[in-house]
Amino acid sequence: MDAMSNGAQAMLAAARQSGVTLCFANPGTTEMPLVQALDDAPGVRAVLGLFEGVCTGAADGYGRMLGRPALTLLHLGPGLANGIANLHNARRARSPVVNLIGQHTAEHLKLDTPLDSDITALAGTVSSWTRTVGSPEAMAADMREAISHAAQATGHIATLIVPVDHQSAAVAPPTDGAPPPAGATRARPSVAHEAVEGVAGLLRDGQPLVFLLGSDALSARGQQAAARIASTTRARFYGETFPARAERGGGLPDIDRLPYFPEPAIAALGQGSHVVLAGSAQPVSLFGYAGLPGTLSQPARTLTLSAPGFDSAAALEALAEAVGAGSDAPGVAPSLYPIDDAPLTPTWVGRIVSNLLPEDSI
């Protein structure tokens, strides 16, 4: 990069130095300096989306699978509004996402232009951190702060509103050194020993506990540890009704999702003396139903092994060790299903597709 660059170039250089390498873009006039910088910036790849909801959905999926944020580049408030539905999904899934939203110059905003809107208010419905860049010199620092916020252990959505004149203004390039490894993921804090031992004590006493798994408790490690615990104790396991991400495939136990409707969900969670949350939030009904509680498990009998964002897989492994569970996870699905000359049914179609999927398919 030259001794001087513009604000857009400095912003993308800071993104690359923070380990962000991908931008899903549906830009317009107020983002043109950033578009030009994406052409010139080494290490940050732009992917054009023909609708803003495609960009935000792709950024959500990228963040869910890799645990590190992608950028979106959207055109003013209406462009952000077009992508909000999938940003809502990203917020609920705790996906790390950074939105870059172009804005008019301060002088042009005074004219109440047809595309002017309250971008901050729109962003606040889905973002936990929102800022309007106040000067060209702040572009790089604000980008680093947005990425740092998004990439916390419980992923967040950060939104930067970037006036077009700041994007094109001359600034010194950031000099923060080499970028972190591209494969770096969010670090998850460990669960306290006391939390593991408290649940282990109930299991050793023969209590029939019901576990609700979410977050990385639905990884391969978490599910295998859950199967080991189930084989040794009276524990039952359910996954969240709408998990952000769940690994499946041969070698993994078959863990049912918590039912959608409140009556069977309450019945499922009522099978135990306590409900134990492992990477899951308190389960609630999606809607209010007359005569039924909104909270699906009684708070007085709900325990937390690990909150979302913590290392739930390691907590379940520690719990398996604490209750003396064996090293093997029984009752797992086969790696390949035997296929014979049987009538073609939905079950057989599923087994054939399963056999043909390559490893680590998404």
Image (tube, rainbow, N blue to C red):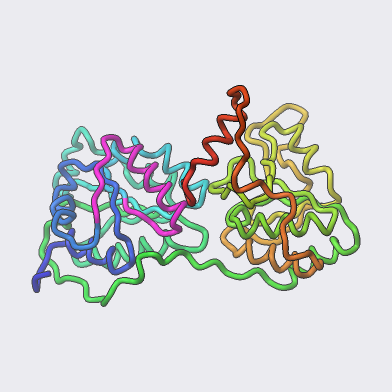
What residue is at 49 percent from the left and 41 percent from the top?
A: 356
Q: Nearer the viewer, residue 56 or 88?
A: 56
Looking at the image, residue 125 sits to the left or right of residue 289; the answer is left
Quarter of the view holding residue 243? top right
Q: Position of residue 111 (x, y in %)?
A: 16, 39
Q: Position of residue 35 (x, y in %)?
A: 17, 50
Number of numbered discs overlaid on the protein picture: 0
- 48 falls in the magenta region: yes
Whether residue 75 is visible: no
Looking at the image, residue 122 sits to the left or right of residue 6; the answer is right
- Which portion, as a residue range, is magenta? 45-71
Quarter containing the N terminus: bottom left
Q: Which of 159 and 343 is in front in this view?
A: 343
Seen in the picture, residue 175 relative to 88 is either above or below; the reply is below
Q: Where is residue 341 in the image (x, y as percent from the top left)?
A: 60, 27
Q: Nearer the viewer, residue 109 or 298?
A: 298
Q: Where is residue 165 in the image (x, y as percent from the top left)?
A: 14, 54
What residue is at 61 percent from the left and 32 percent from the top?
A: 340
Seen in the picture, residue 270 relative to 326 is either above or below; the reply is above
Whether residue 167 is visible: yes
What residue is at 71 percent from the left and 69 percent from the top?
A: 318
Quarter of the view holding residue 265? top right
Looking at this view, name the residue that lies furthest to the right. Answer: 205
